[in-house]
Amino acid sequence: MISVCSETEKKTTLDQALRGVLGDQIVVKQVSCDDYLALIYLSIDCVKEGICSATTPFILLGDVLDCLPLDQCDKIFTFVEENVSTWKSNNFYTAGKNYLLRMCNDLLRRLSKSQNTVFCGRIQLFLARLFPLSEKSGLNLQSQFNLENITVFNKNEQESTLLQKAADEKEDGMEVEEGEMEEEDAPAPCSIPIDYNLYRKFWTLQDYFRNPVQCYDKFSWMTFLKYSDETLAVFKSYKLDDMQASKRKLEELRASGGEHVYFAKFLTSEKLMDLQLSDSNFRRHILLQYLVLFQYLTGQVKFKSYLCSSSLILNDDQSTWIEETTKLVYQLLKEIPPDGDKFATMVEHILSTEENWNAWKNEGCPSFVKERTVDDKPKRPTRKRAAPEDFLGKGPDRKIFMGNDELTRLWNLNHDNMEACKLESREFMPSLDEFFAEAIEQADPVNMVEEEYKVVRNPNYGWRALRLLSRRSPHFFQPTNQKFKSLADYLDSMVSKLAKELPKDIPSEEIKTGEEDDNDEDEDDNGDNLLKESNDSPSIQSKMVSNQQMDNVAAKLGAQWKTLATHLEMKAAEMREIENDSEDEEMQAKLLLVAWQDREGSQATVETLITALNAAGFSQIAETLSEE
């Protein structure tokens, strides 16, 4: 406890000393900004070494910005911007985020939004880089508008200068000769005269852009519709010349040294109206305001109902007008030089991505960090950790673990996998009789199977049939002059040939002919012989063990399944896995038979199981199985 207090006291002492040195520098007033920054750099290094409090650099920054004029604050804030990665590190973020937010808000209160627009924008960008997107303090969760942003213009028609200006231009126009209109710098004539009504309607639209909720009111919407049609008609009829606008733009860039001039507020003087209509950037600003407004009106915004008590739903006429006007606005954007097409495409892309942000805000601004999902699957009982030798296949079980139960089982079926692939049990190729039995049955006209439902029409079946014929049938390589339109027709021909070559001792409805009707008595006499032959070993040998038979055997084995497991050549490790998978003895016996069937494949016949049962001493179960 004493050591902890001493460390805290040391940090407090150094914090106070650094702040005292900064106070002396501020009082002298002859210290440059570099000296302030050097002291702040020193405090940052002290925090990293653990000898200073993490809040000290932010306290020093706040003191400096509070005492310096705005021109020097600009230099200090440049240092703050350059070290944003430092502020976001683990040593500083938690301790200093509130100090930085308070410091930036204090600066914004001192700055003018119209005169220090760039500085204000830098502060906002810094906060956006510092805090995550899901930070609640920086989100407009309720979709509130800046209603204080009022555009002031002349609303008194008696004080308007446009009437006198129009009269003067009319008189001057009578004296202008025709040759004087060919100058490059002369503006294009406007087909719609700029009068006070156009001036008033044009700037009145800014109130709708400031507060879009007004558009849901019936009377306000009619006013907005009327003023918008007139304004867009002016833009449509009064088009800018590409060459003229490009030359003016180049001259402006050269005069300003390549820097763009930005004004935070629109200049609403009546004398500037004709110049503003001739400016490409001004037109783009107005048209872009339309697109943003339309996206808000037609989009799904969660907090619209909190802003106005009336119904915030557009009717069909309003939706149709907005859809048509949106197309017109994009067309006007493409016609504005320079690079109108590129600008319109870029705006459309930005607004489409904005819909994703609207959806994110409607969902409550969830964090972008995804939490790891909890695995709801039941966990198998933990086993004792195996020795390294067991993992390498060198232990007593000589089992190699592949990271998956099924892969482990398949890999350890045989110690030499290459030799296991050569075993006869790996021969999965069926005989021609087995594979084409269904096709031969369907080819019989007596069964009346339609062509589209025949198995030879299945492409997968046809591919397998060709591979089997190439390995087993001599007809595949015999030359023929017969032409087939499709693979199904070819297989029909092969099926008819194979049906004629079926063994004569196998009774089959599909190979009966009309002559057999005359020899029914001979077949009845030989029926007993055929039944006796069918009960011989060949059919039992090829008969696979069914699920019902495995259930019956498992029910009778019960707890004695381990005795049968040794005769089925099951390993000790496999038996332990079966015991861990289930505690029910009957289920364990069933799992044994399933594992044996998976391992043996086509060799898991009834005869093999009967042999194993007799060897294990379960002759009664074997006898019951043979009778089924």
Image (cartoon, helix red, strand yellow):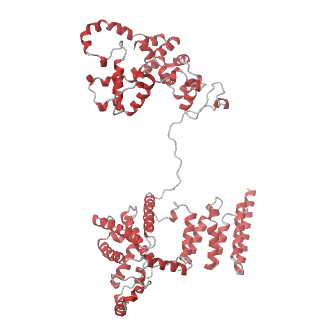
Q: Is residue 130 visible?
A: yes
Residue 148 can be seen in this image: no
Left or right, 125 with reference to 185: right
- Residue 591 versus residue 15 in the image, above or below: above
Looking at the picture, does residue 107 appear above or below residue 483? below
The residue nearer to you, when weighing 185 against 57, is 185
In the displayed structure image, the side of residue 406 where residue 324 appears, left or right = left
Percent across and percent down for residue 521 are: 26, 7
Seen from the viewer's position, the closer of residues 397 and 520 is 520
Determine the image quadrant of residue 50: bottom right
Task: Please give the name of the residue rendered at 51% of the width and 46% of the height, measured from the top-left corner.
Answer: 373
Q: Nearer the viewer, residue 522 or 144?
A: 522
For residue 463, side relative to residue 515 (left or right) = right
Residue 351 pos. (x, y %): 43, 64
Residue at 65% x, 24% y: name it: 396
Position of residue 259 relative to residue 166, above or below, is: above
**Residue 331 figure quarter:** bottom left
Q: Residue at x 28, y 64 (%)?
A: 316
Locate the C terminus by quadrant.
top left
Across and down, in percent, residue 220 comes to 32, 74
Q: Is residue 322 left or right of residue 137?
A: left
Name the image quarter holding the N terminus.
bottom right
- Outermost front residue: 481
State the image coordinates of residue 472 (x, y, percent, origin top left).
44, 22
Number of labels in the image equals 0
Q: Residue furthest top?
A: 525
